[in-house]
Image (cartoon, grey):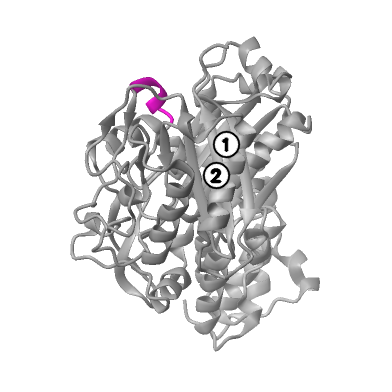
């Protein structure tokens, strides 16, 4: 999966988690929590959705990599290398 | 009751029923004989019948709140907000630490647990995909807790597990918390999301107690020879309860005063009712209200359209009230099905407008009255104009032999 495809996957997940937010202007370098309503349970939804869809296991010590769209995509590139969008 | 602060009145009503999303709409449909039962499909069961509500959850919740919470929570939030609006309370001025939420439930958590098991079944029962939302969604205080989140209430909140007596139990809990001085405002009643769990349908079906009918609106038939079981329904009914002096001070409209209540237990069987204890429950409520059985004008029956339940309740009612012709006995489940935790609440609330319009709504689908339910006072199929409506008694009974009765008096300014 390419970086763009991974970004689309994350965006779809965010739309489900935060259906009241307009995410069209989401800035990739700014933390999610500064741009949208996202608490710790929502954050776990991102982890869970990736686990369900792609069987990606994200250990708790790596959660910090999921703070922005850019860092999330970078973190997931090697893990989703062989996955299909 | 000599101490006015022990007098508890209903000052606002919020509800959603399969045939109405406000008291006015619900009452109009009860008087018009309009059922809310329809065809319904649910996982593993396929097509069945149910009472389904169509309120708009987004009236008081964001889409994220709906997603995060439960159906019971959405129902409770809708009803609580409607009740507050109906009460005329200026919510900004209400002390949130002196408000409490007391909601009766038949069960809670089955829906979410079934959903999660279904979800992990798609992953070879890998529990690592079990949702982190499962616990907050299934704790037993969940629907009441969702109301506190919605309204910013910081006083106590509880769900009262009381099988199908839960609606009355919610009212009683609210009344007691006001009388104890624990709160100054109680949001109380009952809710149910039960149509979203296949287990309740499957359980009643296995018990031989799930209604079937080619015409959905004809399926719920309490007291009728052609009944064949329960129609499961969802819904909610919550009220604002206040002490009489507080309500008068702010010029609130008073929809009735809860003057009597009782709860007791059969202690005989898991599911079969006991008319002796049911009669004792009604008699205790009358005693606490300081009235005799002749004072009751409308008796809202619990009957669920199961053979034994209908017959035993009829025996209990007859034991307490005899054949007095001026009593009107009706049954709301014939319109909406059995709304479980909300049943007692909705059944009482649909009758309260009778204080003003002097009409006892009917029991529909009563084409061939079962002679073993020998209650000549049943209001069959057509509403009955009453000479007076001063007192309404509401029965709600449930599994494990839990019985409840609530008596509401018309408020006459005295």
Residue B62 falls within the magenta-colored stretch: no
- Identify whether B45 is placed above or below B189: below
Q: Residue at x 24, y 51 (%)?
A: B366
Q: Residue at x 75, y 36 (%)?
A: B155
Q: Please, what is the dominant secondary structure of the magenta stretch?
A: helix
Residue B354 falls within the magenta-colored stretch: yes
Q: Is residue B252 left or right of residue B201?
A: right
The span from disc 1 to disc 2 (Cα, nearest Å) is 6 Å
- Identify whether B18 is placed above or below B267: above
The residue sitting at the right extreme is A61
Q: What span is in magenta?
A: B352-357
Q: Quadrant of the C terminus of chain B?
A: top right
Q: Nearer the viewer, residue B365 or B36?
A: B365
Image disc number at residue B282: 2
Chain containing the residue with disc 1: B
Q: Residue at x 72, y 30 (%)?
A: B96
Q: Nearer the viewer, residue B315 or B338?
A: B315
Q: Which residue is mark 1?
A: B286
Q: Quadrant of residue B51?
A: bottom left
Q: Quadrant of residue B106?
A: bottom right
Q: Secondary structure at mark 2?
A: helix
């Amino acid at each position: 999966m390419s970086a763009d495809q991974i970004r689309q996957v994350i965006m779809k997940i965010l739309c489900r988690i935060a259906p009241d937010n307009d995410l069209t202007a989401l800035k990739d370098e700014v933390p999610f929590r500064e741009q949208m309503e996202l608490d710790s349970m929502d954050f776990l939804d991102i982890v869970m959705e990736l686990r369900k869809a792609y069987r990606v296991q994200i250990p708790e010590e790596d959660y910090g990599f999921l703070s922005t769209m850019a860092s999330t995509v970078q973190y997931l590139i090697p893990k989703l290398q062989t996955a299909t969008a | 009751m000599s101490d006015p602060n022990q007098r508890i009145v209903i000052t606002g009503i919020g509800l959603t029923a399969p045939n109405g999303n406000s008291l006015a709409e619900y009452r109009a449909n009860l008087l018009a004989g309009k059922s809310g039962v329809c065809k319904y499909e649910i996982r593993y069961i396929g097509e069945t019948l149910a009472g389904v509500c169509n309120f708009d959850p987004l009236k008081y919740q964001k889409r994220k709140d709906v997603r995060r919470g439960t159906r019971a929570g959405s129902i409770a939030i809708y009803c609580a907000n409607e009740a507050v609006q109906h009460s005329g309370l200026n919510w900004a001025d209400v002390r949130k630490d002196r408000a409490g939420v007391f909601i009766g439930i038949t069960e809670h958590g089955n829906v979410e647990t079934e959903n999660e098991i279904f979800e992990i079944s798609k992953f070879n029962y890998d529990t690592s995909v079990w949702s982190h939302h499962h616990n907050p969604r299934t704790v037993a205080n969940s629907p009441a807790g969702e109301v506190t989140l919605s309204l910013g209430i910081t006083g106590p909140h509880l769900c009262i597990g009381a099988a199908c007596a839960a609606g009355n139990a919610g009212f009683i809990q609210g009344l007691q918390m006001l009388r104890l001085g624990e709160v100054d405002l109680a949001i109380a009643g009952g809710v149910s999301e039960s149509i979203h769990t296949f287990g309740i349908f499957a359980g009643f079906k296995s018990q031989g107690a799930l209604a079937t009918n080619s015409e959905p609106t004809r399926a719920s038939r309490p007291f009728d020879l052609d009944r064949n079981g329960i129609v499961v329904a969802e819904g909610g009914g919550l009220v604002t309860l206040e002490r009489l002096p507080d309500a008068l001070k702010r010029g609130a409209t008073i929809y009735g005063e809860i003057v009597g209540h009782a709860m007791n237990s059969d202690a005989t069987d898991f599911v079969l009712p006991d008319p002796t204890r049911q009669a004792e429950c009604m008699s205790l409520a009358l005693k606490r209200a300081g009235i005799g059985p002749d004072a009751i004008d409308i008796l809202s029956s619990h009957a669920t359209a199961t053979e034994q339940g209908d017959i035993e309740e009829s025996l209990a009612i007859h034991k307490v009230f005899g054949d007095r012709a001026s009593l009107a006995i009706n049954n709301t489940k014939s319109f909406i099905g059995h709304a479980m935790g909300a049943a007692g609440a909705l059944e009482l609330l649909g009758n309260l407008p009778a204080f003003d319009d002097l009409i006892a709504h009917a029991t529909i689908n009563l084409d061939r009255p079962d002679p073993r339910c020998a209650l000549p006072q049943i209001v069959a199929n057509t509403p009955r104009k009453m000479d007076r409506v001063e007192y309404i008694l509401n029965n709600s009974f449930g599994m494990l032999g839990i019985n409840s009765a609530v008596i509401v008096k018309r408020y006459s300014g005295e």
